[in-house]
Image (cartoon, rainbow, N blue to C red):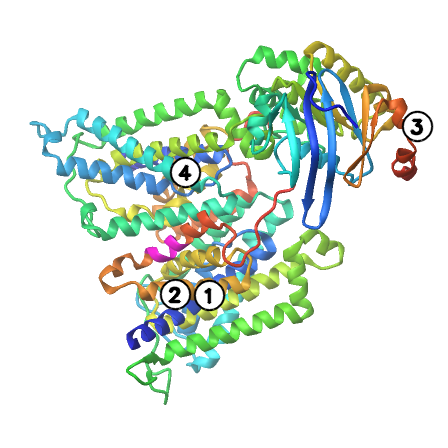
Amino acid sequence: MDGLLQLLINGISIGATYALFALGYTLVFSVLGVINFAHGAVFTCGAYFTYLLLGGAVGSNGMLAGMHFPLALPLLVALPLAGIGAAAMGLLVEAVAFKPLRRRGAEPLLYLITSLGAGVILVNLIQLLMGAEAYALPGNLLGRWPAVLALGHGVQIRTVQLLLLIVAGIAMLILSLWLNRSSYGKALQAVAEDGTTARLLGINSGAIIQLAFAIASFLAGISGGLVALSVNIGGPYFGIGYGLKGLGVLVLGGLGSAPGAVLGGLIIGIAEALVPAKLSAYKDAVAFAFLFLMLILRPQGLLGKPPMEKV
Amino acid sequence: MSAPTSTNNLLEIEQLSVCFGGLQALDRVNLSINEGEILGLIGPNGAGKTTLFNVITGLTAPSHGKLRWQGNSLAGKKPEQICRLGLARTFQNLRLFRELSCINNLQVAMGSNNRRAALELLALVQLQEKADAAAASLAYGDQRKLEFARALATKPKLLLLDEAAAGMNPIEKQDLQALVQRVRCQFKITILIIEHHVPLMMQLCDRLAVLNFGRCIALGSPEQVRRDPLVIEAYLGSQR
Amino acid sequence: MIDISLFVLMLLGALLALAVYLPLRAGQLSLATPGFYTIGGTVAALLSTQLPGLGGSDAVYPLTSLLLEMIVAIAVAGLLAFLIGKPVLKLRGIYLAIATIALVEILRVVLLSSPWFGAAVGIFAIPQPFEGPEGYLIAYGLLLAIVAWACARLERQPLGMAMAAIRDDELAARCMGVSTDQVKLIAFVLSAIVAAAAGVLAAHYFNSWNARQANFDASITTLAFVVLGGSRTWLGPVIGGLVLTALPELLRPIGDLRLIVFGLVILLGPIFIPQGLIKSKQS
């Protein structure tokens, strides 16, 4: 029983990361109806920003070899700053890969290609500047806190996991409050419902779309930093795997549904944690198997709205 | 209102209702379409005319009621099956294959790459010169004519024209009227037509059906319908 | 100096691009091409290394055995595409794209994890039917010629026109009597067959094979071939496949910057030439 509880805790904390990731996808999807394939690269940027802001030095293979940020900031300052850096990257992606197509009313397929192009550029820029090696965040970040908290009955949680859960929870709470209460949030939902009508009502849909990108990328940046803290940075490509899993989460929860993204993230995180060790090689297929079954059985996802076609 | 099963009934619509959520788009509509006639469907916007077309062509499932085509039920048939049974339509908001050439548009509908037959149909609507131009490049009126020819290319027994003359100037409207009458004789087909231009419909149609709020409120010859007090109140009264 | 192996890879790129093009012509964004390519390669690698009978007595692997592998791979990929296509092609637009991404991911994890398929290390020492890259150049040239000719023919047939009609307006196509489900399924199966055939040759050419070929990057790179070359007619993907495969190699002198330039090409291509390099004759 305790073993199961432990698995659940592990699953929930990894699921929270997936959920943060999928929230970013779903925000952009709900206002534009397309998927931003540069999201994984923005997540990676967040991880590297966190590393640098914490005072980490660049390894020997990049163009910036040996350089480091003059200050070693505390984690709770570095993380939001990395998020802001990632948001800036997200806005850049929007400006070069989305805005020119949006102005022309291009077919959705093209967004997929341009956003991927933007992602390829970002990932390879990181590789050029910082090299292809893995980076480990400094180990003493937690200061006086213990690395592992015992919850009794042999069940424990890593402090990093707990932090991940808390940050994810706060981010989701603020996001849902903001979406439903503030005038900006309502405007965003209006654009998501019907862009043309929202424009007629005087809502600046361009600004709302930029806002959606900024928030989505901020969340991706923070989750990038937290995952780096939890499992290290595996190299410039490490965001791609999370990006693809985020897609699974997105579909499971329902495209364009924020609560769905959270629910989907938790389900996939827990399901992965429950895969027995003997079959752990197949673990990475779990999210995609869920995704695939969901698409076949209920394409709108758990909490999404079914699409309608007008004749 | 109409006599049930008789041999020359091509399509019978019985007690047909369609609900979208709380909205009753069609309400117990009864209508029989006789072989060889031109039946006009008029009524104010939102009366359910296009919904009726969508139900007939299999795009919208009815909530209640029956459709019988030459005596056989159309229930559960897919749009492509219904088309192959001999029912073809045009669309209110033009749905051409915009990137395909005019001739390819017809060839898709014919299901063959017979260029000669497609050119003959194009000539019928005077578009033979534009055979290899992309459908999207045509003027609006020409696009309507191309859609008409595309529907004919499926070799229908019943042709459903949705707002056939929308966006056409008076001369084009006259041409269209002549064309519809010619096509009926030449191809021996039955035509169900939706059109807002009432004078045109009075001249063109053998019978008129009037829909209002999803109900069929009148059915008869143009003369009868014109004098029907319900129609005058509900439909003509609401015209500008 | 450009190596002959680059030309082999360019022809392979053009073939994979045609595999992406076929469903896309019918408006279906399938990213499953690297999956079927991997299946083709895996079938060839397994047959040629596990069945001693196929090797013959010569030092050089017999062409008849290669042809046999091709037939088996086409049958396996075609059947799989048929079975998967039925449910998957009910999905529209981005949903189909995501489902096919998932398929490729599941396939890779399964192939890499099961010992029958060589697991993570893959299958080695795949016998060579040709003595040098020239033989592969001819074989790929021949395969590309056949596939391109078939695509060109298809485009003038009712089936090819129906595919383009579905892309333009699926609902109108149905109302004009086109069995859209059937047409989409045929396009999907044909695509799988082309990709699998390309994979059979690739397994021999690369001499070793593992499922890491089936990844998301490959899906997007092959899609980029088609988007940049043009997806209205067969020539577009062929040109796109040839050029974009050559590009990173030709850019090799600029070193690490080359992938950034490649990224710029995929980013800017759709913005400046949305229809691709090769447009349809009507527009």
Q: Mark 4 lies on which chain?
A: C
Chain ID of residue with mark 2: A
Residue marked by disc 4? C85
For image coordinates 54% across by 30% down, the residue present is C279
Q: Give the range drawn in magenta.
A: A285-290
x, y (%) of residue A180? 64, 68
For the residues beneath circles 1 and 4, the answer to whether they share a chain is: no
Q: Are marks 2 and 4 in contact (CB under 8 Å)?
A: no
- Pinpoint the chain carrying mark 3: B
Residue that carries the numbered disc 3 in the rendered image: B227
| Nearer-the-camera pick, C16 or B84 | B84
Calculate the distance from the C-alpha at mark 1 to the C-alpha at mark 4. Answer: 30 Å
Name the front one of labels 1 and 2.
2
**Is residue C218 rendered magenta in the image?**
no
The amino acid on which the numbered mark 2 sits, given as a three-letter code, is: Gly
Measured in 3D between alpha carbons, the distance from the residue under mark 2 to the one under mark 4, in whole angstroms, is 29 Å
Q: As rendered, which of A90 and C259 lies closer to the eye?
A: A90
Q: Distance between the residues labelled 3 and 2?
A: 71 Å
Q: Quick check: do tags 3 and 2 share a chain?
A: no
B49 w.r.t. A78: above or below: above
Q: Are marks 2 and 4 on the same chain?
A: no
Q: Is residue C213 left or right of residue C22?
A: left
Query: Foreground residue, B22 or C245?
Result: B22
Q: Residue A269 carries which label?
A: 2
Residue C215 is situated, as x and y percent measured from the top left of the image, at 34, 49
Residue type highlighted by circle 3: Arg
Q: Which residue is labeled 1 in the image? A: A19
Q: Is mark 4 on a helix, strand or loop?
A: helix
The residue that appears at 62% across and 18% down in the rendered structure is: B153
Residues at discs 1 and 3 in contact (Cβ within 8 Å): no
Nearest the viewer among A190 and A272 is A272
